[in-house]
Image (cartoon, grey):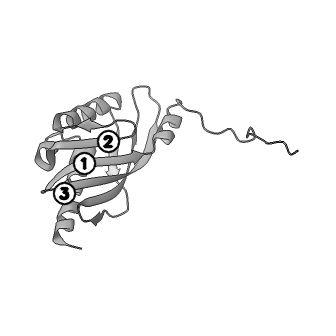
């Protein structure tokens, strides 16, 4: 692995710890490009540093005690990309618990994070909040044989 890939992994680890883990918005100015895009299925896309800060602020307002941490898998780097897994959860203002995991791909260019795209367990989270019902065993569609 090249030293650039190691540097990219270290930058993503620092970003994740401070942005998602500690809600430190200053890390966006330090590590992200001016045209930074953050894109998750339940929140994105948010374009630019100020938009990324607003997204996290709004998310923390709706989920005051939510926390995130890196999962037990290592970060994987290849060229300008770093991939990582994380878990998060807490209680939204409704009081219901919600926990989910995600795989995120970060793209880095010129020593800055330019893109954070992830696919969080949106369906799992929505089911836990009671907004989407899961399958009902025993009520499957059955096709009649002719």
Residue visible at 88% across and 44% down?
A: 146
Residue visible at 35% across and 38% down?
A: 66
Residue 42 location (% of width, % of height): 39, 36
> Outermost residue toward the right?
146
- Res. 137 image quadrant: top right
Q: Nearer the viewer, residue 76 or 74?
A: 76
Horizontally, is 146 left or right of 99 in the view? right
Q: Which residue is mark 3?
A: 11
Q: Is residue 43 above or below residue 106?
A: above
Between discs 3 and 2, the one toward the N terminus: 3
Asked whether disc 2 touches disc 1, contact meaning CB atoms under 8 Å apart, the reply is yes
> Label 1 crowding class (10 Å Cα cut-off): few <14, some 14-19, many 20+?
many
Numbered circle sitting on residue 9 = none
Asked whether disc 3 touches disc 2, contact meaning CB atoms under 8 Å apart, the reply is no
Q: Please state the total of marks drawn on the protein image.
A: 3
| C-alpha span from label 3 to label 2 | 18 Å
Between discs 2 and 1, the one toward the N terminus: 2
| C-alpha span from label 2 to label 1 | 8 Å
Q: Which type of secondary structure does the marked residue at label 1 adopt? A: strand
Residue visible at 21% across and 66% down?
A: 5
Residue 113 location (% of width, % of height): 19, 51
| C-alpha span from label 1 to label 3 | 13 Å
Horizontally, is 96 left or right of 45 in the view? right
Numbered circle sitting on residue 39 = 2
Q: Which residue is mark 1?
A: 115
Q: Nearer the viewer, residue 66 or 33?
A: 33
Q: Quadrant of the N terminus?
A: bottom left
- Res. 50 image quadrant: top left
């Amino acid at each position: 692995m090249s030293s650039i890939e190691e540097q990219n992994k270290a930058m993503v680890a620092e970003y994740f710890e401070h942005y998602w883990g500690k809600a430190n918005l200053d890390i966006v100015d330090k590590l992200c490009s001016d045209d930074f895009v953050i894109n998750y299925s339940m929140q994105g896309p948010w374009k630019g540093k100020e938009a990324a800060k607003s997204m996290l602020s709004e998310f923390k307002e709706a989920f005051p005690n939510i926390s995130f941490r890196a999962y037990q898998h290592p970060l994987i780097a290849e060229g300008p990309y770093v991939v990582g897994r994380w878990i998060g959860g807490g209680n939204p203002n409704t009081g219901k618990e919600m926990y989910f995991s995600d795989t995120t791909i970060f793209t880095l260019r010129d020593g800055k994070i330019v893109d954070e795209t992830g696919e969080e367990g949106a369906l799992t989270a929505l089911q836990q909040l009671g907004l989407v019902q899961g399958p009902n065993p025993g009520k499957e569609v059955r096709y009649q044989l002719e």
